[in-house]
Image: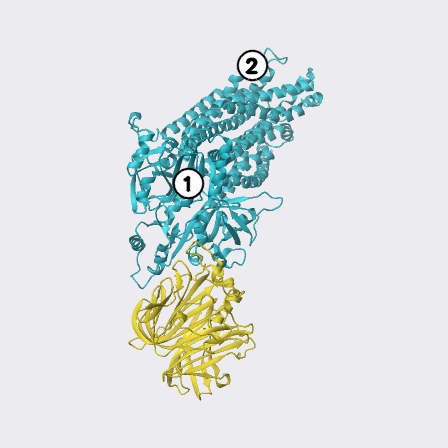
Chain colours: A yellow, B cyan
Amino acid sequence: MIFHLVLRILVTTCAVCFLLASACNNQRAQDAATVSLHSGLGGDASGFKRACGPRDFNFPADHGPHPEYRNEWWYITGNVENSSNEKYGFHVTFFRIASTPVTTQKSTSKWSANEFYMGHFAITAANKQKIKYFERFGRAAAGLAGATLPTARKNSFSNRIWLDDWQLELTDTGSNTEIRLTLTEDDTGLDLLLLAQKPKVLQGKNGYSQKSDDPCNASYYYALTRLAVDGNVTFDGETEPVSGSAWLDREWSSSALSDEQVGWDWFALQMDDGRDIMLYQLRNSDGGVDSHSHAVELDVNGGKNIIPLEGWQVETETWWQSNSGARYPVAGRINLSELGETIVYKPLLENQELDLTVRYWEGAIELFSPEGKKLGRGYMELTGY
Amino acid sequence: MLIGMALGVAVVFAVDIANESAKRAFSLSLDTVTGRTTHQIVAGANGLDETIYTKLRTELGIRQSAPLIQGDVNLLGVQTPGLSHSSESLQLLGVDIFAEPMFRNQVGRTNTDLDSLKLLKQGAVILADTTAQRLHAGIGDHLDVIDGGMQLELIATVSTELQPGFESIAMVDIATAQELLGLQGRLSRIDLILPLPPSIAENNPTIEETIRTIEAEFPGVSVSDAARRDGALSQMTEAFHTNLLAMSLLALLVGAFLIYNTVTLSVLQRRQTFGQLRALGIQRQQLFRSILTETLAFGLIGTLAGVLVGYFLGSLLLTLVTRTINDLYFTLDVSQVEFSTFTLIKALMIGLGVSLLSAVPPALEASNSNPGIVLQRSSVERRVSNLAPIIFLGGVLLLLVGVAILWVSNASLWAGFLAIFFIVAGYSLMIPKLLLILTKLADRRTGRSSTLGSYPVRSLSASLSRTSVAIAALAVSVSATAGVGIMIGSFRLSVDNWLVNTLQSDVYIRASSGGSIPEPVLGQLSALTNLSGTQTARMTEVETNTVPVRLMAVGFSGDTVASYQFNKRSNKVGATDQSMPTARQRMESLDNSDSVIISEPFANKSNLAVNDTLTLLTDVGAIRFAIAGIFTNYTTGKGLVVISMNTYRRYWQDAQISSIGLSFNNKDVAPEFDAISARLRSIVANESLSIRSNHEIRERSLLIFDQTFAITHVLRILTVGIAFVGILSALMALSLERRSEYAILRAVGLTPNELRKLLILQTGLMGLIAGLLALPLGIAMSKVLVGVINVRSFGWTMEYIVPSAVLLECLLLAVLAAILAGIYPAQKLSNLSPSEALRHQ
């Protein structure tokens, strides 16, 4: 989702550190080679298709990759609990990034690749007050990483997104969507089955999500805002059965943000009453909120209600500073005047910063009423800090 | 004095640093290629199936792995006006940029702000900055691949300062490497870092368990220890470096002679001054100490100058050393001259130590002489003359020790060099006595013919203490020239004979390293008219249980049998000549049984003999092959194993052909042959294949041979150069000492011209004697070089021939060097004013 901004940061900083697989947690390998991803992400998007207006979505095909666009991601966050009500947050993203348009290379080698995948995987354990996160890269060739197009099986269509042995398998029966997530790295892992509880939502204008005044600074965006989760989580080498709920975002585009936008706060809120609220505010360099910020409420059945810009406001209450020096607004309240309610959000753990190739804060949050009554849970992403 | 010292030190230092730099570059290059790798997955002749890597990562979850394709690539430089069109032979390293950071971190050390994703682009290459410079290539320039039919685009350079090992490497994406080498679907190897990090799947498998898992999962592959492989590779060049070191020791010996002479000269020159100082009341000890201090000071300056000169000389030598390594072993590129403090200290110690030691006898001589009285030279000379027989006996003893060492030692290269050293040292000790004998002989001949009678000859033996040292120095260096000359001559002849025998076909068409000749091309080739025979071969690299070797599978024909010269000596001890099978029998046994023939260097290095077995990693696992014969081969240090095509295809699923030899009827009819060549070129156009006639190959091989030994030529010239300066300084010492003697000669009526002639005659005589004395030593040295050193260091046996031209050349060299050295002192002395010189008496 918010990765427009992430990409933007990639473009401007140019320097990307590949993390060693063995360097888990916050330990960046000392001698990890610095590699820049400039041409893959910035520069000119010529030769790629751009999202300049609404399109017709086509499922199950749109679960698969859109190689004519430069960037794309499959993004899942979720909150789960074990049998003793210990809470975990998890976050898995597969990014597809093309370095050149599809047709420019003609090679007889199976390793020839014009795109690559970046994978992010994090688990937060509330009771241990610990987050573990990992990053991977792989070329979209020789079977090392990629995304398949949905293929028909009995009554359903199924496709696979993978990077080495991290895998997301998506099955769509038309009325139901099911996702199997299997990821392990060192002594951390996930093996979860996710079942959609609501229909797909096309975000923005029928799935066309404009991010600035330039109509082509936009992406195609759909989501499954509530998936029931069942399976196992392994943390510190201990495997436990868990259950809870998750959120899928799918987005693809060829563009980045406009120059004056510096950062992004994004919320995926799952209310205990069955409603889901998604909102993001784009922060401008002058400190203000960009007019292309967006909020939407989805009722129990998936009915969509866009909240106008003046109908909501985010107020920061707690700032947390990471070792890198960045300060993140990790707790606060969301005033939804349009709906006549206020949601107080608190992180499961203050330190949910992912110090990866792109550094950002991505973590599980809990939702309360101003009186302290539990309202739900969700995920928050803070970039550009 | 300074020049003499500086030269002596310079040569020793230069050879040392050239040696050291090449060695360092080699180990860095290994580091660059191997990186943090602990283990490597390798397989049979064609490398690995690329899907093994995918399975390793996606199914087994072994992510501390990196795929690699290795091969050779020749890059043609960018054409620049006014500069020659350069080319570089480099190691092609095909990598997956996403797997690399864990293994090799050179990508992070690029000079340009590298966008490493650019490497994914087809044909993109990263080179070392120095390599790029030599190719006159800038970022964005395109470089032609010789025999590759492809262009590479330079996208970034790596600083050799940060990553010196990168100099021999052309880094490309694995896809580009596959295309360039025609290795689609294959990998050379997969690097691993073991043990694996803790995982949730199993309880942290040990290294052995992981290896077992991999080997069980993928039949036909094996996991080998990276460190052991590298060790085996670096051993290959060890012998070559030892050879160079020996050369530098020889230079040291001659250098020491030189320093000795220069220091002696400088003290002698001022004997009068020292006498005056003594008369003025300076004490013996004081004088002795001040002479030594002065020598030390000069020695320091001379040595430092020598180190400086040696540094530049070393960088010149380095080019030659690396070229030799490239020709003999593998692609290596060094431009950085490196030396350790140890080398520096060694050079300093040699320079200072030898000068101090050399200064002691003349300093003693000067400080012990009575004030005002010039020491009687004659007494010193009488002493030396009397000592000569004793020194001679000592020399004979040393010589015998040298021979004994050769006898006793078995395979040690060092023992071989030690023996040479003893022989040389022993022989040079014999020189004073031999000189006396020779001058006596010469005296009888010349005594009657010249106006001066026996004077020129006798004065040589009269000043034995000076002349014998100079003559010994010249004799040793000339003998080294002779020895090495004979060795190279024998070697070249053997190589040439071998080439003529081996190259039975008229034209050879060969795929670039690791690649193969496409099927349609083969079809067209065998349909050529005028064809009288074809010979196909498949060249690959396979693993043995120790080092990787080159495996050549050949289809047999009559020509093939003739291509191999079998070595008689390499049979096991006890095998008699009668029991030896003929070449044909051996080749037939290759076709019918699991046997191979191996190259002589490989046999010698690995201690393998006929009837031993050799384990090769085939596509169906490790198989033991019997060794049916050992054949002469002068190619590289990497072992060569020959197998029959039938046997090869039984064990390797590989039907490809990497080279084909074509023989033609009417090949001597020039126009027809031209037509054939044109036809061939049109067939193989656009393929990454090279066409060479057997003449071309032979010429190229001999050219490489000559280039390889260029370094020995240079060292020889240097050694003779040092000897030349040695003679010069000995003559200067002599002429100084004999000023009054010559003054008397002038006074009694000798014209300056006659005196000059006399002096030149004398030095010429010295040269002749040195040359004559050098010959037996040179021949002895060449015997040891051919029969012992070459076998022990390279594993090559060769024919031994003594070309008379080489001997004559040496004799001339000695005389010429001596006469040239004599011109200056002769000129100086003949212009001497007799009265002036005699007034000092």
Whether labels 2 and 1 belong to a single chain: the reply is: yes
Label 2 vs label 1, nearer the camera: 1
Left or right for A23, reference B481? left
Q: Which residue is mark 2?
A: B443
Chain at tag 2: B
Quarter of the C terminus of chain B within the rendering: top right
What mark, if any, has residue B659 been given in the picture? 1
Q: Residues within 10 Å of mark 2 (few under 14, many from 20)?
A: some
Residue A243, by quadrant, is bottom left
Q: Earlier in the sequence, mark 2 or mark 1?
A: 2
Q: Residues within 10 Å of mark 1 (few under 14, many from 20)?
A: many
Chain at tag 1: B
What is the secondary structure assignment of the residue under circle 1?
Answer: strand
Residue A371: percent from left, percent from top: 40, 88
Instruction: Determine the residue positioned at 59% across, 24% down.
Output: B816
Instruction: Determine the residue positioned at 36% across, 37% down.
Output: B555
**Location of residue A201 with respect to B215 vertically, above or below:** below
Of A33 and A270, which appears nearest the observer? Answer: A270
Of B376 and B55, which appears nearest the observer? Answer: B55
Residue B22: percent from left, percent from top: 48, 43
Residue B340: percent from left, percent from top: 50, 45
